[in-house]
Amino acid sequence: MLELGHVAGPGIITYPLYDEPFQMVAPRGHPWEKRAAIPSHEVRGEEVLVLKAGNCFREQVLDACPDISHAEGAMGQGHSIETIRCMVASGFSAFRSCR
């Protein structure tokens, strides 16, 4: 897979290859457990886990869901998606990987 990032200029045309929605992972028993969708503004004030700084997926999540990083909520960090998934499964927090 070739990733060119944001390439623009004379003689260059860019096309989106795909659009993949983000998803939120929450521990069993969480108030959002039975909901089909959670608007990003509802995340404000919630304890949320994201990947550590420097991870491109983290930046995509924060760009798509700016309410995650709002000062009202706590934002934990993990080294990998698998680590965060295990933390959520143990009831630590919700993980936002979504729109």
Image: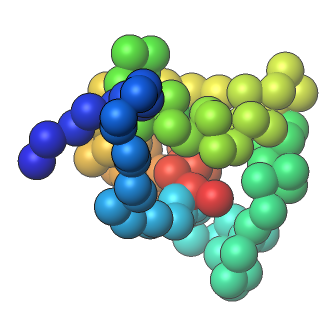
Colouring: rainbow
Q: Nearer the viewer, residue 91 or 70?
A: 70
Q: Is residue 3 above or below residue 42?
A: above
Residue at (50% x, 29% y) in the render: 59
Residue at (26% x, 33% y) in the render: 4
**Residue 47 horizontal/vertical position (percent):** 71, 38
Q: Nearer the viewer, residue 91 or 39?
A: 39
Q: Nearer the viewer, residue 45 or 39?
A: 39
Quadrant in the rendering for residue 28? bottom right
Q: Locate residue 26 relative to residue 32 in the image: left or right.
A: left
Quadrant in the rendering for residue 10? top left
Residue 25 in view in this figure: no
**Residue 58 horizontal/vertical position (percent):** 47, 32
Residue at (52% x, 60% y) in the render: 22
Q: Nearer the viewer, residue 12 or 15?
A: 12
Q: Locate residue 92 relative to residue 48 in the image: left or right.
A: left
Residue at (57% x, 49% y) in the render: 96
Residue 3 in view in this figure: yes
Quadrant in the rendering for residue 46? top right
Q: How many tags in the picture?
A: 0
**Residue 77 horizontal/vertical position (percent):** 48, 25
Q: Locate residue 16 relative to residue 68 in the image: left or right.
A: left
Q: Residue furthest top?
A: 54
Q: Quadrant of the C terminus?
A: bottom right
**Residue 14 horizontal/vertical position (percent):** 39, 47
Q: Residue furthest front?
A: 11
